[in-house]
Amino acid sequence: MIPVETINLNEVNRFKMSRIVLIDDDPRFRRMLRRLLTREGHQVTESEDGNTGLEQVKILNPDLVITDMVMPEKDGIETVTEIIKWNREIKILAISGGGKITTDIYLQMAKQLGANRICNKGVEPVELIKIVNELLAL
């Protein structure tokens, strides 16, 4: 048995499984990202649009929300705005692969509204994991 005084709580917390809600209308992208994040030890809940994503956010109170910007029903701008109104403590990563207006405009709008980080869907998996880990460490 390990004496309690030898347990480093920082090490224990470093391996805490984080709750992540992933909101994206592209099922292939969601599946790929869920696998990537699950392998890192995170619990991932998927939603296909902003409406169901917000329901999951309110039920789960996740550590992080990763949301696409261009989606049917409720777009990412509305989704980011409502998450921040509901709970400013939730970290938000806004992602986009394009749409009616350029990706950069959508992502900059999300950043101005309060998303903690932004990135394009084309980001390398290693870089995406680095961004997620940085957000969860905040």
Image (cartoon, rainbow, N blue to C red):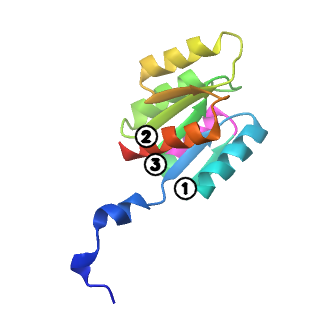
Q: Residue furthest bottom?
A: 1
Q: Which residue is identified by label 3?
A: 61
Q: Residue furthest right?
A: 28
Q: Residue at x 55, y 19 (%)?
A: 107
- Few, some or many C-alpha atoms within 10 Å of disc 2 (few <14, some 14-19, many ≥20)? some
The disc, 1 or 3, on the residue closer to the chain's N-terminal end is: 1
The disc, 2 or 1, on the residue closer to the chain's N-terminal end is: 1
Circle 1 or circle 3, nearest the eye: 1
Q: Are marks 1 and 3 in contact (CB under 8 Å)?
A: no
- Few, some or many C-alpha atoms within 10 Å of disc 1 (few <14, some 14-19, many ≥20)? some
Q: Position of residue 68 (x, y in %)?
A: 63, 29
Q: Amino acid at mark 2?
A: Leu
Q: Which residue is identified by label 2?
A: 135
Q: Is residue 15 left or right of residue 29?
A: left
Q: Position of residue 7 (x, y in %)?
A: 29, 74
- Few, some or many C-alpha atoms within 10 Å of disc 3 (few <14, some 14-19, many ≥20)? some
- Does the stretch in magenta take in 49? yes
Circle 3 sits in a helix, a strand or a loop, which is it? loop
Circle 1 sits in a helix, a strand or a loop, which is it? loop
Q: Amino acid at mark 1?
A: His
Q: Which residue is identified by label 1?
A: 42
Label number found at residue 138? none
Q: Residue at x 48, y 48 (%)?
A: 62
- Does the stretch in magenta take in 120? no
- Real-space Cα separation, disc 1 to disc 3, in angstroms: 14 Å
Q: Are marks 2 and 1 in contact (CB under 8 Å)?
A: no
Q: Amino acid at mark 3?
A: Asn
Circle 2 sits in a helix, a strand or a loop, which is it? helix
Q: 88 or 106, which lies in front?
A: 106
Q: Position of residue 37 (x, y in %)?
A: 60, 50
The segment highlighted magenta reads 48-57
Q: Position of residue 133 (x, y in %)?
A: 47, 45
